Image (cartoon, helix red, strand yellow):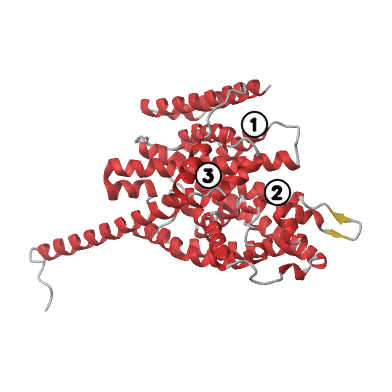
Amino acid sequence: MLTVIVIVFFISAILMDCLTLLKTMQQKREKAIYYTLMLISFCVLIAYSLNIPVPSPSNGIIKVLDALFHIKK
Amino acid sequence: MDFERMCAMPNEKVTIHQATFSIMLFSFGSSVILGISTKANQDVWISILLAAVLAIPVLLIYARIISLFPEKNLYAISEILFGKIIGKIVSVLMMWYSIHLAALVLRNFAEFIQVFDMPETPQLAIMILITVSTTYLARSGMRAIGKWSVVAVCFVCFVVLFTFGTSIHQMNASNLLPLIESSPAQIAKESFAILAFPYAESVIFLCLADSFQKQDSPYKMFFYSLGLIVVVFLLVFMRNLMLLGRAMMELSYYPSYIAVRVIGIGDFFARIESSISSNFILAGIVKISACLLAAGKGIAQVFGVKTHRTLILPMGMCTLALCAILFKSTMEMFAFIDYYLYYAAPFQIIIPLIIWIGAERYTRKQEEKGASTASVDAPLGKEPCS
């Protein structure tokens, strides 16, 4: 169910953008950034919806801060 | 208004009132629902005031940067001061902070709504709905966020005053005692925590400073909003503490919501806790939208893209993806608050401090250059009247 929600959401978002803002995009770089970011977020959300574990940046941040400041009680 | 016309619109500026209320709601954002830190027990009010004092030099730095470079945002300023490469590194760091902060607030939203309102609904569905509305607001520009803030701040203040007023008869003032039970070190630590979350989070507005009008004083914007937010926080904290008591407040993850649940006048007036949810939504939307707009401007600056509007949706999607994988549970989310002080310090204090020092040196050099050029040009010009 979640996977369907993610797919429908992305398709409708890109379609909406195609009808409105994407027409105004003139630089190739702009399009490249747009589609790259959309693809990355789509992959992460699909993995999340399929319960495929994706490493969280919070764990990395916590480990680094713990090593530096010994915050853990 | 359709999006194509909106894209063609020039850079929109906000008025001083819109900016002040945006900063206020931004600070109010998630604190309204997560509650102000309770580790200093009933002495948190001292920490709130001390944090406000600590916030003064930080906000002075922010305001000084904006006044030295009017109508420029932090991304542009860092490129002017440190060149393209270091400037872009600074921009990437601030952009990451904007996205991460937006994802954290979005997660707070989703957790809260799932815990209290929709336990059966998957969090992702809630996150998507909020992402759609905040992305739309961010794409509409800073002026739209400002206008939204002016309307929302009236409602937010009304709810705070209303819940405070209607709960007075149930308050137990002895919950405030004993005074200064916590150690000075504990109070100071909590002050720093409150400084990082939420006072100094307004660093995001340095990334949106190009939307401020040149004639508007950034000092007024930051300090008026600080004053308002301190008053609101004190009211919220006093209400929660006097209604719930210290032990209950420490135990609850969402003290404001639980406190307002207690309020009842006779048999006919009760269950007004939904007003707290609406406060959270109104203020939280401002916070996420401002972060998305800052991130969109950042990525446009880093990659040299002419307009940031087209990149706000992908940034919103990245925020959504980040939000989904950030924490596994509500407990994990609350545990991260302990680390947030240390995590946010480089973005809130160190980067602005370096930029401020660089900005002062840069403007001094420019003034010296201007003065020497004027002295060289003087003999070429007309003789001054004697």
Q: Quadrant of the N terminus of chain A?
A: top right
Q: Is residue B258 visible?
A: yes
State which chain disc 3 sits on: B
Task: Give the residue type at disc 1.
Answer: Leu
Q: CA distance from mark 2 to mark 3?
A: 20 Å
For disc 1, the neighbor class at 10 Å (few under 14, some 14 to 19, many from 20) is many
Residue B163 horizontal/vertical position (percent): 75, 60
State which chain disc 2 sits on: B
User: Which of pointers 2 and 3 lies earlier in the amino acid sequence?
Assistant: 3
Q: Which residue is mark 1?
A: B124
For the residue labelled by badge 1, is the local secondary structure a helix, a strand or a loop? helix
Task: Give the residue type at disc 3.
Answer: Leu
Residue A69 horizontal/vertical position (percent): 46, 50
For disc 3, the neighbor class at 10 Å (few under 14, some 14 to 19, many from 20) is many
Q: Which residue is mark 2?
A: B278
Q: Quadrant of residue B150?
A: bottom right
Q: How many marks?
A: 3
* Residue at screen point 53% across, 41% down: B138
Viewer-proximal residue among B164 and B188: B188
Q: Report if the CB atoms under discs 2 and 1 are less than 8 Å apart.
A: no
